[in-house]
Image (cartoon, rainbow, N blue to C red):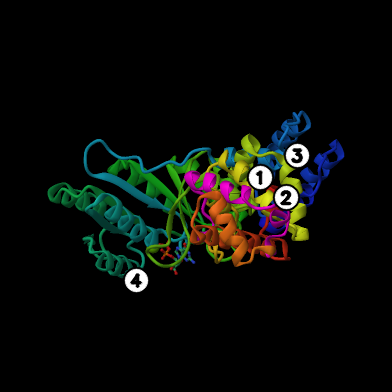
Amino acid sequence: LTDRLQNAMSKLRRKGKVTEADVKEMMREIRLALLEADVNFKVVKDFTKRVSDRAVGIEVLESLTPAQQIVKIVDEELTATLGTEMVGINKSPKIPTIIMMSGLQGAGKTTFVGKLAQHLQKTENARPLLIAGDVYRPAAIEQLKVLGQQIDAPVFELGTDVSPVEIVRQGLEQAYANKNDYVFIDTAGRLHIDEHLMGELKDIKELANPDEILLVVDGMTGQDAVTVADSFNEQLDITGVVVTKLDGDSRGGAALSIRAVTGKPIKFVGTGEKLTDIEVFHPDRMSSRILGMGDMLTLIEKAQQDYDEKKAEELATKMKENTFDFNDFIEQLDQVMGMGPIEDLLKMIPGMSNMPGIDQVKVDPKDVERKKAIVYSMTPAERENPDLLNPSRRRRIAAGSGNSVVEVNRMIKQFNESRKMMQQLTKGKMPAGMDQMFG
Ligand code: GDP
Ligand code: MG
């Protein structure tokens, strides 16, 4: 999904003004990107209509270019399509909370039982019981037992000769007797949806009256996952969806359509084969991931409120020309004070958080005044040309500003540090979206 959409985004991002024709072209790109990513065509149509409706009537905000605003609209609508809010497990008021799995063979049901059970053990000290309801393959029971051993959770099984409904009945009895707070019912899948499978699942549902019926779909199967989700939902009235195999280069498009087509929330995603590869589904994060922008949008929002764009533009030019001096430094300090710590802002830019030197970029409000005092004790020539600052000049500045030489040195070191970082940023290795921050 991301490549095409990202291209469209960055094309737009470079534009100052957006015409109606631009919006049209942008929508075409988005439509293609979504279709390519196996998003259901009805969903795509809906989505692009909502975005263009809002984009055409766009109000020009002072600090945001229309392009940035469209990016924001796309993100908001993507998030809305994905479900707006994160939805947790439906818990039963009385223990046990019963969670029934459903889905095709190989989707990742059994693995997910292990993942979620362990997740609940860690986050709520849960004492889950796992019921082996897949009686068609002895290996399936063995697989669940191995998982149970790994996470130290009991597994209830009666082999392959007893019907799944009977196994679930007895398993639930044991859960009540042992006061387990969660029961997971692992079920069989088929390669394709068939009536026998659905009948069996319906019988289990009727008997167990589960609090959750989670449908597990393989995120790598794209459009098929949507069809599967639709028919399972129709037959079982599922309560939530788990999209697995979102690791690797699988397409996020399935997630987008499943939510829109079934109306049921995506609750978790699987991101690998290990038991810890489970994530609670966050629609807003997924949207950013689809857009490939990290928390760029949060950054835009902050910038929208506080940032003086003209100053930022000047700053960007100076960064590029490497003429960033102490006068700019002071101006930057002032701007940054209104926005919260600069290190937080920088960390929001994709790829920045693990950049070497990021930890040195710190702005402490009390410190700012001292830094300003130091700069004010410099001559205009020194401010414009930081390289002039030899030891004797530093001593003079220290005395003049009422600071120690150590403090002056530290401040100059920090200045050089941020200067260096800015050079790195403007030198080819500009992280995606950084251009947006500085105009
Ligand atoms: P079931 O037939 O629905 O019970 O599926 P399984 O739980 O047995 O999983 C089928 C295969 O998919 C196994 O090889 C799992 O290791 C693998 N699998 C499950 N979830 C994920 C995931 O999130 N990512 C990846 N890469 N593999 C997964
Ligand atoms: Mg299984």
Q: Residue at label 1?
A: 331
> Which residue is at a point 38% across and 52% down the rendered structure image?
101
Specify whether residue 182 is painted magenta.
no
For residue 65, which numbered disc appears in the image?
A: 3
For residue 315, which numbered disc appears in the image?
A: 2
For residue 143, which numbered disc appears in the image?
A: none
Q: Secondary structure at mark 2?
A: helix
> Which residue is at a point 77% across and 53% down the rendered structure image?
317
Tell me whether the residue at label 3 lies in contact with that at label 1, contact meaning CB atoms closer than 8 angstroms. no
Residue 298 quadrant? top right
Residue 341 at x, y = what percent? 52, 46
Look at the numbered disc 4 and say if its residue's Cβ is closer than 8 Å to ligand 2. no
Residue 436 at x, y = what percent? 71, 48
State the separation of the CA atoms marked 3 and 1.
Answer: 23 Å
In the rendered view, tell whether residue 58 sits above or below residue 193: above
Q: Where are the magenta residues, as a range?
A: 359-387
Tell me whether the residue at label 2 lies in contact with that at label 1, contact meaning CB atoms closer than 8 angstroms. yes
Q: Is residue 280 visible?
A: yes
Q: Main secondary structure of the magenta part?
A: helix
Q: Is residue 7 visible?
A: no
In this rendering, would 22 be left or right of 256? right
Considering only order in the chain, which callout, 3 or 2, is on the residue closer to the N terminus? 3
